[in-house]
Image: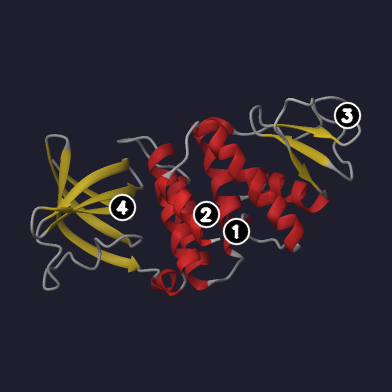
Amino acid sequence: MHLTVSGIVLRVRQSGDNDRLCTILTDTHGVIHAYAKGARSMKNKNTTATAQFVYGHFELFRRKEFYTIDESSYEDLFTGLREDIVRLSIAQYLCQLAMELVPDEQPAGDFLPLLRAALYYLSENARPPLLVKAAAELRMLSMAGYMPDLVMCAGCGAYEHDVMYFLPSTGQIRCGQCGVGGGESSFRLGRGAMTAMRHAIYAEQKKLFAFTLSEESLQQFSKASEAFVLAKLERNLTTLAFLHTML
């Protein structure tokens, strides 16, 4: 079976002496695994388009559970990611998160344009890396069916308060007046961080990264969002663990 897709190469592994096994987030078939024969050779026609992070177009032939890449072309290389280890690490983490959340062999929906936009902002250093990370991971979780309930305080129904507390285990918020139980893990959010959390899950996708935060609010936003990821996945990711060694 022949298939034509557009997608982002999430991960590349060596296969044999000269081949690559690429994990690709595609527009029409979600996450797929495809062999690129001879792609580890610099003279191979598929070498450039089958590198990690590349957004490109792929002509595939399916054999059993795997695909083979017959032809490929690239549209975005995101070369700026390799200029900074933190931005590179965040890109690797978001790619691994996509592998965890996007179903195989099903249309990717908004996951593909979301990841492409995140890689662009990271590559161009157009937004603070932690802002891109937090906004992207929270939106990914929401699209995968783990949307937190940030509309109002779970205790009294208040929409705004100078201080809100985010509970990653339940995805709920409680205002500073209601507070949280002593045994519950929670993250304190000022108004800026609270607005950022809501923006990340409710804003139009094209405006997802179109905001700024103070350093304090950014740290609150980042920690709360990451805690929600860990609570829902119930395990750490290797790329996230590595990222923490860089921060």
Residue 219 versus residue 167 in the image, above or below? below
Q: Which residue is mark 2?
A: 244
Quarter of the image for the N terminus: give it.
Answer: top left
Which circle's residue, 3 or 4, is located before the other in the chain?
4
Q: Which residue is mark 4?
A: 11
Q: How would you rate the neighbour count of disc 4 (Cα within 10 Å): few for under 14, some for 14-19, many for 20 or more?
A: many
Residue ID at (33%, 62%): 54
Q: CA distance from mark 4 to mark 2?
A: 20 Å
Q: CA distance from mark 1 to mark 4?
A: 21 Å
Q: CA distance from mark 3 to mark 4?
A: 45 Å
Callout 2: SS: helix
Which circle's residue, 1 or 2, is located before the other in the chain?
1
Q: Nearer the viewer, residue 107 or 163?
A: 163
Identify the amino acid type marked 4: Arg
Total of numbered circles in the picture?
A: 4
Residue ID at (23%, 68%): 48
Label 2 close to label 3 by CB (< 8 Å): no
Q: Which residue is mark 3?
A: 178
Residue ID at (69%, 55%): 219
Which circle's residue, 2 or 3, is located before the other in the chain?
3
| Mark 4 or 2: the one toward you | 2
Which circle's residue, 3 or 1, is located before the other in the chain?
1
Callout 1: SS: helix
| Mark 1 or 2: the one toward you | 2
Callout 3: SS: loop
Q: Which residue is mark 1?
A: 130
Q: CA distance from mark 3 to mark 1?
A: 29 Å
In the rendered image, residue 113, in percent from the top left (x then y), is placed at: 46, 53
Identify the amino acid type marked 1: Leu
